[in-house]
């Protein structure tokens, strides 16, 4: 592989970019990606089977060791792609400085990004002793003026920034940094593992989808062994008189996140509408406490009406498809369920972006608000895995 360490005679030579060393042995089909990334194996967006990138017999073009490498980024929802990036830095450098964007910068990117402290803690819980973390206050950071660093790691998107940094270093009379460009880490479907896709609710931090196509085509049957687990309020319970549900609902609305609002249940939907709040998605079945309502919810406020067949105690492909369609619509949507919608929150959390507000009534107690996060998604995936599957 063609590379220089920074002592080239011309700008073009100094500014060359090298790729990290990779192993040429591919993983077995169907093997878990995490096992390979945990061993620090990566390259061209794929995982490779080896125990050490520098010692494996199939390693190609070993690179000279560098002293101090800089890595910058947001590092929201620390994932396998982040790990591959830092592993690439650790593989070529004795020391690695990770510069994490501060809260002020991150807030401009998304309102649901984790705090600086949470993002730093996630890195440090994974990192080894050669990694230190620092707060990044601007897009460039200290790289243009640091004399004690010799390299910088980037992704294809941030390569241009690194080249600009080297131009600034040349103007400052400093040797350009060795640029290590790390290819994207791909998920099981071939998509890029990224924080934005995780926030969109598409994948988890390991690159696994929350509900596969096969899963979406199955019918799940509730069994009594899960009754107690499902009866427990999963989220924040706002209490209030059952005769005046707007008391609890008003408290819930004061605590919502920046994301959309999904209301499940006729009483919850009707209460929000009476309060002048049209949820982004509503799911109703014409029942309350499994008794048919005399006065149906007025759904004329919604721009799109969908229907789903979902018998009591089941989660059907029809319900899953309707929830997915509603989430992809840019119109306020009401799903009318022929059957029962009680189990809909399981599917809603699995398919929704992070930060989505899911509200539903808790009989005799009040209103539950659960904001979709990774913990909610994992819990719902675990619960759904315990359901029986209709063949």
Image: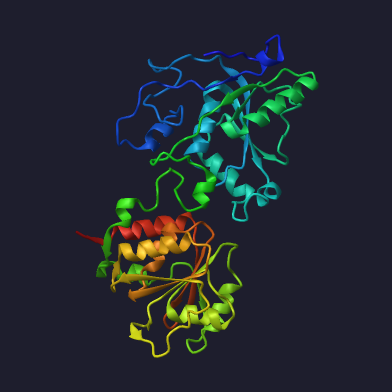
**Residue 333 versus residue 135 in the image, above or below:** below
- Of residues 37 and 298, the one nearer the viewer is 298
Q: What x and y, as percent, mark residue 186? A: 44, 37
Residue at 80 percent of width and 21 percent of height: 171
- Of residues 342 and 131, the one nearer the viewer is 342
> Is 77 positioned to the left or the right of 254 in the image?
left
- Of residues 128 and 67, the one nearer the viewer is 67
Residue at 50 percent of width and 34 percent of height: 184
**Residue 205 versus residue 128 in the image, above or below:** below
**Residue 110 versus residue 238 in the image, above or below:** above
Q: What x and y, as percent, mark residue 317? A: 31, 62
Q: Quadrant of residue 147?
A: top right
Q: Is residue 318 visible?
A: yes
Q: What x and y, as percent, mark residue 240? A: 52, 83
Q: What x and y, as percent, mark residue 28? A: 30, 30
Residue at 71 percent of width and 11 percent of height: 10
Q: Quadrant of residue 101?
A: top right
């Amino acid at each position: 592989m063609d590379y220089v360490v920074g002592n080239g005679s011309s700008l073009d030579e100094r500014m060359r970019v090298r790729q990290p060393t990779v192993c040429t042995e591919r993983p077995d089909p169907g093997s878990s990606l995490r096992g390979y990334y945990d061993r620090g194996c990566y390259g061209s967006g794929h995982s490779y089977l080896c125990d050490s990138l520098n010692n494996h017999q199939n390693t190609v073009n070993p690179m000279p060791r560098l002293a101090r490498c800089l890595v910058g980024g947001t590092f929201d929802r620390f994932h396998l792609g982040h790990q591959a990036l830092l592993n690439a830095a650790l593989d070529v450098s004795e020391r690695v400085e990770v510069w994490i964007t501060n809260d002020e910068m991150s807030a401009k990117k998304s309102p649901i990004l984790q705090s600086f402290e949470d993002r730093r803690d996630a890195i440090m819980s994974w990192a080894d002793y050669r990694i230190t973390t620092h707060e990044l206050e601007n897009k460039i950071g200290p790289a243009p003026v640091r004399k004690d660093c010799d390299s910088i790691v980037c992704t294809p998107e941030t390569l241009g920034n690194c080249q600009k940094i080297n131009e600034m270093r040349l103007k400052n009379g400093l040797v350009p940094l060795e640029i290590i460009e790390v290819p994207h880490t791909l998920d099981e479907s071939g998509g890029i593992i990224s924080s934005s896709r995780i926030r969109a609710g598409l994948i988890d931090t390991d690159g696994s989808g929350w509900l596969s196509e096969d899963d979406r085509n199955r019918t799940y049957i509730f069994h009594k062994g899960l009754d107690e687990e499902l009866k427990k309020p999963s989220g924040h319970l706002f209490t209030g008189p059952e005769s005046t549900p707007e008391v609890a609902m008003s408290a819930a609305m004061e605590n919502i996140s920046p994301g959309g609002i999904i209301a499940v249940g006729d009483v919850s939907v009707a209460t929000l509408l009476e309060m002048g709040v049209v949820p982004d998605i509503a799911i109703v079945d014409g029942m309350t406490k499994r008794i048919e309502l005399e006065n149906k919810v007025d759904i004329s406020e919604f721009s799109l009406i969908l229907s789903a067949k979902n018998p009591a105690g089941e989660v059907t492909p029809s319900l899953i498809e309707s929830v997915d369609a509603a989430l992809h619509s840019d119109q306020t949507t009401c799903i009318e369920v022929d059957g029962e919608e009680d189990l809909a929150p399981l599917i809603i959390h699995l398919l929704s972006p992070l930060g989505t507000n899911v509200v539903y009534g808790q009989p005799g107690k009040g209103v539950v608000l659960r904001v979709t996060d990774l913990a909610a998604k994992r819990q719902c995936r675990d619960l759904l895995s315990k359901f029986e599957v209709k063949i």
